[in-house]
Image (cartoon, helix red, strand yellow):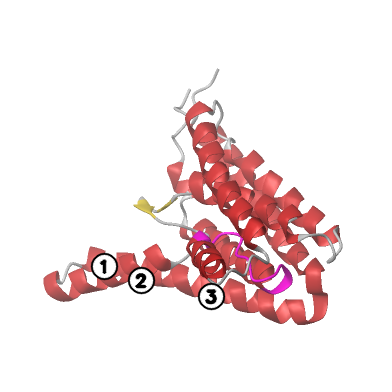
Amino acid sequence: MAEKEDFPEIYSTRIMANALMMVGGFIDAYTFVQRGGILAAGQTGNIIFTSVNIANQDFNGVTAKLVTICAFAFGCFLGEIIRKKHRTHYWRVPVLSLEVIIFAVVGILPRSLPNIAIVPLLACVMAMQTTVFSQIEGRAYNNVFSTGNIKKAMVGLANFVTTHDHHQLTTALIFLQLVVCFALGAMVSAILQNRWGVTTIWWASGLLAVLTVGYAIAIYVRGQRYEEPK
């Protein structure tokens, strides 16, 4: 029987990582426009917005932002617990499936529902996503925000310029691609929101559903090919 981490190349492929980056950008743009300027995944932004609001004694939306930050932190905690306790090759599939379901449900809920009832839920599952899908071809990355990815792209490029190591150039291009995919996800989300409004999130749910099914099938096929007969 193969070990439970025998298939890292499946969850850390560029296709998987780039698709998850698009989802990350898509959801942040969605909550920023549809949910009062709150970011589901970009907690640095939420911390800054909250701090400025408090300093200016403008408490409108502060509670929702604070709860969102806490929900994201809890999602990271929960994702790590799941990672350490899993007993099957398919352990990431339920995380993605939960995300698909929550995205679908959020699209049904009325725009009048308070932001505090929506954004923290999205923040939690986005945090779980970035915690359990944390590598691209053996390199650590984040798939729900881009600051770290920009830094790694530029560090890789600088290392290539100074050492002519083509491995560093590959790293730079991989992380630049991630940043572009995040931006594309945000732009597509903004365009679709002009027509679909709050139901725009169904597009992200659909993309993630396809990705989840493909990921599960890939695990099954790889398992059939490499696991020893029982």
Q: Is residue 214 visible?
A: no
Residue closer to the observer: 209 or 32: 32
Name the quadrant of the C terminus: top right
**Which tag, 1 or 2, sits closer to the chain's start?**
1
Disc 1 marks which amino acid?
Answer: Gly
CB atoms of marks 1 and 2 within 8 Å: yes
Q: Residues within 10 Å of mark 1 (few under 14, many from 20)?
A: many
Farthest residue, direction top:
230
Q: Could you say which disc has been placed on residue 183 in the image? A: 3
Q: Horizontal and vertical percent for residue 8? A: 44, 43
Q: Residues within 10 Å of mark 2 (few under 14, many from 20)?
A: some
Q: Horizontal and vertical percent for residue 58? A: 62, 70
Disc 3 marks which amino acid?
Answer: Ala
Residue 82: name its quadrant. top right
In magenta, the rendered stretch is 33-43
Disc 2 marks which amino acid?
Answer: Leu
Q: Which residue is mark 1?
A: 156
How would you classify the magenta stretch by its main secondary structure? loop
Q: Which residue is mark 2?
A: 173
Residue at the spot x=49%, y=46% of the render?
A: 131
Farthest residue, direction left:
163
Secondary structure of the residue carrying tag 3 is: helix
Residue at the spot x=58%, y=40% of the render?
A: 92
Q: Give left or right: position of 115 versus 13.
A: right
